[in-house]
Image (tube, rainbow, N blue to C red):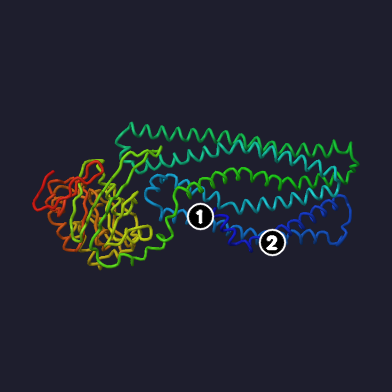
Amino acid sequence: MEIFKILQRKSKVFYLFLTLMGFTNAIWSNSLLVLISNKIAGTPLPFFNDYDLLVFVGMIVTSFFISRLFQSFMLKLSIEISYDMVNRIFNKLRYAAYEKFIKFGKEKVYSLLSDTQIVSDFPQHFIEAFNSLVLFLVGISYLFYISFPGGLTVFLTLTALGIIYYYKTRSIIKYVSQGRELSDIYHRNINDLISGFKEIKMSSAKANNLCIRLDENRRKVKGLNIIMSLKWMNNDLLGRYFWFITIGLILFVLPHFFSFDAQMISSFIVTLLFLMGPVGALIGVIPYYSRIKVAISKLSDFDKKVDLESLSEVNSASGSVFAGPFSTLRSSQIEYEYHDKEQKATFSVHIENFLLRSGETVFVTGGNGSGKTTFLNIIVGLFRPDSGSIYFNDILVDDTNYIDYRDKIAVIFADNFMFSENYENIQISEENQELISLIDLLQMTNLIKIDKEKNKLDIELSKGQQKRLSMIYALLENKDILVLDEWAADQDPIFRKYFYNHFLKRLKKMGKTIVIVTHDDLYYGSADRIVRFDFGRITKDELVNSPVHY
């Protein structure tokens, strides 16, 4: 786990602080117990008897500053762990294969970010447990020093408490795990509510069923929380009343079997009161242990399911592999299969040969479920074929250059997503003549608002207008290949005609190679080639000399 790697990097400083803290706490707690016990019993201190107040103040002040120093270190370490773990998730998602991300589910990412916060609190909980353990050992050792039988009785009683508490806590972990699974479902339902708000408003049945599921989820969570809270409460009460049992043993039972005078009893009671805090802190770590166990399990599962792609790919985004203008993109014997949960093949795409030449405009057609979108995802590098090869400018596309390959292709998907920020850092201002020209070319001069201060364009547009805005951004990327998935489907008839009859010609003059997934058979004559898919296969790949209809 990342948390242990971070601790290992800081091991020298960490262990130095840990040793200093443990040594200081051991001396401080032992001296404090002796000082208080002797003061109550009226026994003079072996040293500095006339300055017992100064000794007491000195111990408190010294312990305070050392504790403050160490707590500051642990606080910074917790924040660093949180930062590193969240950053690790983002980087893994950045380089994760698209198929793996889809299978993992975005709702689980939200829950994972909560898990990182639980794990990042580890240093703070650890140091509290460590301090408490030191104080506990010092206190028990002091009791053994005063009276071995009495110390042994207290030690066995508290050990029994710890064992009972531990096994009772293990029965609660399953509820914590169930709560975590419900959290994934909850985030998925919330995403449906937010992303599909318009659709929900248009269907009372859909709205009711979604709210029913949310209510059922929260009811289950409420039930789990009640069960866990009652179990934690029972454990807490058990711990508290164990102290009364222990004090009762010291006051009423042990004096009948061993020679316990009033001073010894007083020392035992003072020590037991002193130990209540440390033992309570040690027991309090156990609930956190149950949560961190589940969190680490989920983070480990994420590591396995969303693996980083090869380091060669991570470090390959240099742009130099496919330098120079685009000439050809070809594929050979591509195979890709979809599988169900039992890993049985449900649909397959087989592309024997496909060739895309520079400057071509290719329309990809076919019915729903024919394999067009899968073909598109393979060609743009989102899906990696199970077998077969892709060549860009006669260079094999593989794990070492997929990032470079994807950087050569601009894509506007059918479910196009408009980002709220200008992540490409394109200059968004009236001074950018290329931008102004594209806005005019897409007939959006009176529709788009330029926010020069925030360096972005207004995205509060209709779906079709957002597609045009995406086209502007895609063309500003200045990539040779442009892939469009049902781009014109959201345009009005007038602009759709303009797009096929005029805009595509402008793109060709710009030197663009264009691949369009489309059902607009009325405009097939605007293509250089028509590629048709049926049942995951290319059934036609023909040149267009005149308007054609399928």
Total count of labels: 2
Q: Give 218 or 541, whichever is nearer the viewer.
A: 541
In screen coordinates, is 145 left or right of 431?
right
- Pinpoint residue 22: horizontal percent, then vertical percent: 71, 57
Specify few, some or many for label 2: CA neighbours under 10 Å numbering under 14, 14-19, or 20 or more: some
Does residue 229 sit above or below 376 in this rendering? above
Q: Residue at x 68, y 36 (%)?
A: 237
In screen coordinates, is 178 left or right of 529?
right
Q: Quadrant of residue 104?
A: top left
Residue type highlighted by circle 1 = Met
- Pinpoint residue 470: horizontal percent, then vertical percent: 26, 55
The label on residue 530 is none
Q: Residue at x 69, y 44 (%)?
A: 280
Q: Which of the two discs, 1 and 2, labels the residue nearer the N terminus? A: 2
Residue for badge 2? 66
- Pinpoint residue 111: horizontal percent, then vertical percent: 47, 45
Specify few, some or many for label 1: CA neighbours under 10 Å numbering under 14, 14-19, or 20 or more: many
Residue for badge 1? 85
Q: Quadrant of residue 69?
A: bottom right
- Pinpoint residue 406: horizontal percent, then vertical percent: 32, 58
Q: Give 203 or 378, whichever is nearer the viewer.
A: 378
Report helix, strand or loop for mark 2. helix
Q: Residue at x 44, y 50 (%)?
A: 306
Report helix, strand or loop for mark 1. helix
Residue type highlighted by circle 2 = Ile
Q: Give 149 or 528, whichever is nearer the viewer.
A: 528
- Quarter of the image where the C terminus is located: top left
